[in-house]
Image (cartoon, grey):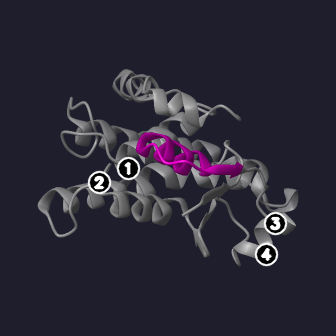
Protein backbone atom coordinates (compact mmCIF):
# COMPACT_ATOMS: atom_id res chain seq x y z
CA UNK A 1 0.00 0.00 0.00
CA UNK A 2 1.48 3.35 -1.02
CA UNK A 3 2.10 6.12 1.52
CA UNK A 4 2.31 9.80 0.63
CA UNK A 5 3.09 12.47 3.22
CA UNK A 6 2.03 16.01 2.36
CA UNK A 7 3.37 19.08 4.14
CA UNK A 8 6.60 21.03 4.68
CA UNK A 9 9.33 19.54 6.87
CA UNK A 10 9.34 22.72 9.01
CA UNK A 11 5.89 21.80 10.36
CA UNK A 12 4.48 18.88 12.36
CA UNK A 13 4.87 16.96 9.08
CA UNK A 14 8.42 16.25 10.26
CA UNK A 15 6.98 13.99 12.97
CA UNK A 16 5.39 11.74 10.36
CA UNK A 17 8.49 11.73 8.14
CA UNK A 18 10.69 10.75 11.09
CA UNK A 19 8.30 7.98 12.12
CA UNK A 20 8.29 6.54 8.60
CA UNK A 21 12.09 6.65 8.49
CA UNK A 22 12.29 4.86 11.86
CA UNK A 23 9.86 2.22 10.63
CA UNK A 24 11.74 1.82 7.35
CA UNK A 25 8.56 2.22 5.31
CA UNK A 26 8.76 3.55 1.76
CA UNK A 27 6.87 6.78 1.15
CA UNK A 28 6.57 9.76 -1.15
CA UNK A 29 6.83 13.29 0.22
CA UNK A 30 4.98 16.19 -1.35
CA UNK A 31 5.42 19.72 -0.09
CA UNK A 32 2.22 21.76 0.15
CA UNK A 33 1.63 24.58 2.60
CA UNK A 34 -1.30 24.83 5.03
CA UNK A 35 -4.28 26.55 3.38
CA UNK A 36 -2.95 25.75 -0.10
CA UNK A 37 -5.45 24.41 -2.65
CA UNK A 38 -3.86 20.93 -2.38
CA UNK A 39 -4.29 20.83 1.41
CA UNK A 40 -7.73 22.46 1.40
CA UNK A 41 -8.95 19.69 -0.91
CA UNK A 42 -7.73 16.99 1.50
CA UNK A 43 -8.27 18.40 4.99
CA UNK A 44 -11.30 20.52 5.97
CA UNK A 45 -9.14 22.10 8.70
CA UNK A 46 -6.65 23.21 6.00
CA UNK A 47 -3.73 21.93 8.09
CA UNK A 48 -0.71 19.73 7.54
CA UNK A 49 0.37 17.00 7.69
CA UNK A 50 -1.82 14.86 5.51
CA UNK A 51 -1.07 11.19 4.95
CA UNK A 52 -2.47 9.33 1.97
CA UNK A 53 -2.49 5.65 2.94
CA UNK A 54 -3.80 3.93 -0.15
CA UNK A 55 -7.30 5.37 -0.59
CA UNK A 56 -7.49 6.69 2.98
CA UNK A 57 -6.74 10.32 3.84
CA UNK A 58 -5.45 10.77 7.39
CA UNK A 59 -4.81 14.06 9.18
CA UNK A 60 -3.29 15.25 12.49
CA UNK A 61 0.32 14.27 13.15
CA UNK A 62 -0.41 12.45 16.41
CA UNK A 63 -3.26 10.42 14.92
CA UNK A 64 -1.02 9.49 11.98
CA UNK A 65 1.78 8.40 14.34
CA UNK A 66 -0.63 6.17 16.26
CA UNK A 67 -2.01 4.72 13.02
CA UNK A 68 1.39 3.84 11.60
CA UNK A 69 2.90 2.43 14.78
CA UNK A 70 -0.17 0.46 15.84
CA UNK A 71 -0.33 -1.06 12.36
CA UNK A 72 3.38 -1.93 12.37
CA UNK A 73 3.45 -2.84 16.09
CA UNK A 74 6.69 -0.88 16.55
CA UNK A 75 7.67 2.43 18.22
CA UNK A 76 4.71 1.99 20.55
CA UNK A 77 3.38 -0.27 23.29
CA UNK A 78 0.52 -2.76 23.19
CA UNK A 79 -2.90 -1.10 23.52
CA UNK A 80 -4.39 -1.90 26.92
CA UNK A 81 -1.00 -2.38 28.58
CA UNK A 82 0.34 -0.28 31.45
CA UNK A 83 3.26 0.75 29.23
CA UNK A 84 0.80 2.05 26.64
CA UNK A 85 -1.11 4.01 29.29
CA UNK A 86 2.17 5.60 30.43
CA UNK A 87 3.10 6.49 26.85
CA UNK A 88 -0.36 7.94 26.21
CA UNK A 89 -0.14 10.05 29.38
CA UNK A 90 3.27 11.38 28.33
CA UNK A 91 1.95 12.26 24.88
CA UNK A 92 -1.05 14.04 26.40
CA UNK A 93 1.35 16.08 28.55
CA UNK A 94 3.48 16.97 25.53
CA UNK A 95 0.50 18.14 23.49
CA UNK A 96 -1.34 20.04 26.20
CA UNK A 97 1.55 21.56 28.14
CA UNK A 98 4.86 21.53 26.25
CA UNK A 99 3.53 22.19 22.73
CA UNK A 100 0.69 24.59 23.64
CA UNK A 101 2.85 27.66 24.37
CA UNK A 102 4.95 26.99 21.26
CA UNK A 103 1.84 26.97 19.09
CA UNK A 104 0.53 30.11 20.80
CA UNK A 105 3.80 31.92 20.08
CA UNK A 106 3.66 30.82 16.44
CA UNK A 107 0.07 32.01 16.14
CA UNK A 108 1.02 35.46 17.41
CA UNK A 109 4.24 35.57 15.36
CA UNK A 110 3.09 34.59 11.87
CA UNK A 111 -0.03 32.40 11.75
CA UNK A 112 -2.73 34.93 12.66
CA UNK A 113 -3.44 37.99 10.51
CA UNK A 114 -1.18 40.83 11.63
CA UNK A 115 -3.98 42.84 13.21
CA UNK A 116 -4.86 39.88 15.47
CA UNK A 117 -1.34 39.25 16.79
CA UNK A 118 -0.44 40.22 20.36
CA UNK A 119 3.33 39.94 20.85
CA UNK A 120 2.96 41.48 24.30
CA UNK A 121 1.96 38.00 25.52
CA UNK A 122 5.38 36.52 24.60
CA UNK A 123 6.76 36.85 28.17
CA UNK A 124 3.75 34.93 29.52
CA UNK A 125 4.19 32.29 26.83
CA UNK A 126 7.87 31.95 27.75
CA UNK A 127 6.90 31.46 31.40
CA UNK A 128 4.33 28.80 30.46
CA UNK A 129 6.89 26.94 28.37
CA UNK A 130 9.54 27.13 31.12
CA UNK A 131 7.08 25.61 33.62
CA UNK A 132 6.19 22.83 31.16
CA UNK A 133 9.84 22.16 30.40
CA UNK A 134 10.60 21.73 34.10
CA UNK A 135 7.82 19.13 34.23
CA UNK A 136 9.31 17.45 31.16
CA UNK A 137 12.68 17.05 32.86
CA UNK A 138 11.00 15.66 36.00
CA UNK A 139 9.13 13.11 33.89
CA UNK A 140 12.26 12.21 31.94
CA UNK A 141 14.04 11.65 35.28
CA UNK A 142 17.41 10.80 33.74
CA UNK A 143 16.02 8.13 31.42
CA UNK A 144 17.21 7.71 27.85
CA UNK A 145 13.69 7.75 26.42
CA UNK A 146 10.60 9.69 27.46
CA UNK A 147 8.01 6.91 27.79
CA UNK A 148 9.76 3.72 28.77
CA UNK A 149 12.83 1.66 27.97
CA UNK A 150 12.67 2.10 24.20
CA UNK A 151 12.20 4.79 21.57
CA UNK A 152 8.50 5.50 20.88
CA UNK A 153 6.34 8.10 19.20
CA UNK A 154 6.45 10.02 22.50
CA UNK A 155 10.11 10.70 21.73
CA UNK A 156 9.23 11.91 18.24
CA UNK A 157 6.74 14.44 19.63
CA UNK A 158 9.01 15.50 22.51
CA UNK A 159 11.96 16.04 20.19
CA UNK A 160 9.87 18.04 17.75
CA UNK A 161 8.62 20.28 20.55
CA UNK A 162 12.08 20.89 22.00
CA UNK A 163 13.56 21.54 18.55
CA UNK A 164 10.72 23.99 17.86
CA UNK A 165 11.35 25.71 21.20
CA UNK A 166 14.99 26.43 20.33
CA UNK A 167 13.75 28.86 17.65
CA UNK A 168 12.66 31.34 20.32
CA UNK A 169 14.15 30.41 23.69
CA UNK A 170 16.84 28.51 25.48
CA UNK A 171 16.17 25.10 26.98
CA UNK A 172 17.75 23.41 29.98
CA UNK A 173 20.92 21.33 29.78
CA UNK A 174 18.87 18.21 30.50
CA UNK A 175 16.46 18.95 27.66
CA UNK A 176 19.32 19.87 25.32
CA UNK A 177 21.13 16.61 26.07
CA UNK A 178 17.92 14.65 25.38
CA UNK A 179 17.36 16.63 22.16
CA UNK A 180 20.93 16.02 20.98
CA UNK A 181 20.60 12.30 21.74
CA UNK A 182 17.38 11.98 19.77
CA UNK A 183 18.71 14.04 16.85
CA UNK A 184 21.70 11.71 16.59
CA UNK A 185 19.41 8.94 15.33
CA UNK A 186 19.97 8.28 11.60
CA UNK A 187 16.23 8.36 10.91
CA UNK A 188 16.04 11.93 12.28
CA UNK A 189 18.70 13.10 9.81
CA UNK A 190 16.94 11.29 6.94
CA UNK A 191 13.61 12.93 7.84
CA UNK A 192 15.14 16.44 7.75
CA UNK A 193 16.64 16.24 4.26
CA UNK A 194 14.10 18.65 2.69
CA UNK A 195 14.25 21.25 5.49
Q: CA distance from mark 4 to mark 3?
A: 5 Å
Vertical arrangement, residue 142 with respect to residue 9, above or below: above
Please give the residue where the numbered disc 4 appears in the rendered image. Answer: 41
| Residue 38 x/y as whole percent | 81, 66
Q: Which mark is residue 38?
A: 3
Crowdedness of circle 2 by 10 Å Cα count: few (<14), some, many (20+)? many
The residue at the point 64 percent across, 58 percent down is 4
Q: Nearer the viewer, residue 148 or 30?
A: 30
Crowdedness of circle 4 by 10 Å Cα count: few (<14), some, many (20+)? few
Please give the residue where the numbered disc 2 appears in the rendered image. Answer: 76
Residue contact between numbered discs 2 and 1, judged by CB atoms under 8 Å: yes
Q: Earlier in the sequence, mark 2 or mark 1?
A: 2
Main secondary structure along the magenta-highlighted residues: helix
Looking at the rendered structure, the secondary structure element under dot 2 is loop
Residue range (magenta) = 13-29
Residue 26 in magenta stretch: yes
Q: Earlier in the sequence, mark 4 or mark 1?
A: 4
Residue contact between numbered discs 4 and 3, judged by CB atoms under 8 Å: yes
Residue found at the far bottom of this picture: 44
Vertical arrangement, residue 22 with respect to residue 51, above or below: above
Vertical arrangement, residue 177 with respect to residue 124, above or below: above
Q: Earlier in the sequence, mark 3 or mark 1?
A: 3
Please give the residue where the numbered disc 1 appears in the rendered image. Answer: 153
Quadrant of the image occupied by residue 37: bottom right
Q: CA distance from mark 3 to mark 2?
A: 31 Å
Amino acid sequence: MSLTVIGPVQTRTSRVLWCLEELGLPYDHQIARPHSPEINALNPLKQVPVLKDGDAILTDSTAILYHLTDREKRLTHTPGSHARAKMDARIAFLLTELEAPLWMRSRHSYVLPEDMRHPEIFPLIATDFAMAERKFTRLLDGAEFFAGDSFTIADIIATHCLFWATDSQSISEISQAYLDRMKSRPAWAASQKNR
